[in-house]
Image: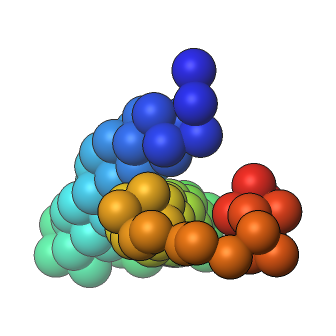
Amino acid sequence: MNSYTAFCMMALVSGSNGIISIIMGGLYFFKILLLELPSEHNIADSVALLLTGTCYMGLFIYCIIQIFKKKIWATTNFSSVEMRPLLNN
């Protein structure tokens, strides 16, 4: 598997996990505020879900940037021999 495929798979997984975590954390937070008496434990759970979703979305954005960077590098024609080692990173 090349790195382009790996970044595509990571973007798919992290994006879906991030969206689900943010939705679940938001719904849980509003459920606590509207239906229950807020306690420290409940609010900490919802904030943890929101932070987890935010981290997953950060990983998703990083993967998308890497995918576009690799597409640009793959379509660019470098004729200089000195640039070829830089493309392997």
Q: State the image coordinates of residue 22 (x, y, percent, origin top left).
A: 33, 64
Residue at 68 percent across and 76 percent down: it is: 80
Report the front residue among 62 and 22: 62
Number of on-image labels: 0
The residue at 45%/69% (across/down) is 77
* Residue 59 relative to residue 18: left or right: right
In front here: 31 or 24? Answer: 24
Q: Is residue 16 above or below residue 81?
A: above
Could you tell me residue 61's position as x and y percent? 43, 71
The picture places residue 19, in percent across and down from the top left corner, at 28, 57
Q: Nearer the viewer, residue 18 or 29?
A: 18
Residue at the top extreme of this rendering:
1
Quadrant (top left/top right/bottom left/bottom right) for the C terminus: bottom right
Q: Quadrant of residue 29?
A: bottom left
Q: Residue at x 35, y 63 (%)?
A: 75
Asked where in the image residue 51 lies, by quadrant, the reply is bottom right
Left or right for 88, reference 8: right
